Image: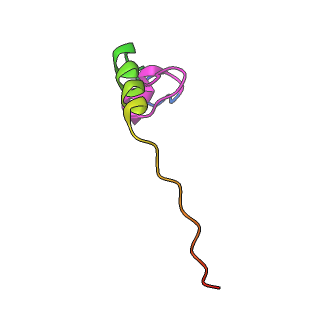
Amino acid sequence: MGRGDKKTAKGKRFKGSFGVSRPHKVASKGAKAVAAKVEKTTKPAKAEKAPKVKA
């Protein structure tokens, strides 16, 4: 068990992969709060108008 073993953290660091043994970094609460605030302040997209039909 070492660098060649993909199931260990050392093996995942060697391969550059992520998983149960080596999870990705979790975003901090501050980043989530900022993202939620930005999402609320952005304007919603305009609804598309139906094309005018000449009679």
Task: Please state if 53 lies on the left or on the right of 8 as rendered.
Answer: right
Q: Does residue 47 belong to the magenta stretch?
A: no
Q: Nearer the viewer, residue 27 or 1?
A: 27
Q: Is residue 55 above or below residue 21?
A: below
In percent of width and height, residue 8 lies at: 49, 21
In percent of width and height, residue 38 lies at: 36, 30
The answer to whether residue 33 is visible is yes
Residue drawn at x 53%, y 54% as measured from the top left: 47
Residue 25 picture quarter? top left
Bounds of the magenta segment: 7-24
Q: Among all residues in the image, which is located at the extreme top?
A: 29
In percent of width and height, residue 17 lies at: 44, 34
Task: Please state if 15 lies on the left or on the right of 7 as rendered.
Answer: left
In percent of width and height, residue 23 lies at: 47, 22
Q: Is residue 54 above or below residue 11?
A: below
Q: How is the image coloured?
A: rainbow
Q: Is residue 10 above or below residue 51?
A: above
Main SS category, magenta section: loop
Q: Among all residues in the image, which is located at the extreme front?
A: 55
In the rendered view of the protein, which quadrant contains the C terminus? bottom right
Residue drawn at x 44%, y 22% as measured from the top left: 2
Q: Nearer the viewer, residue 54 or 30?
A: 54
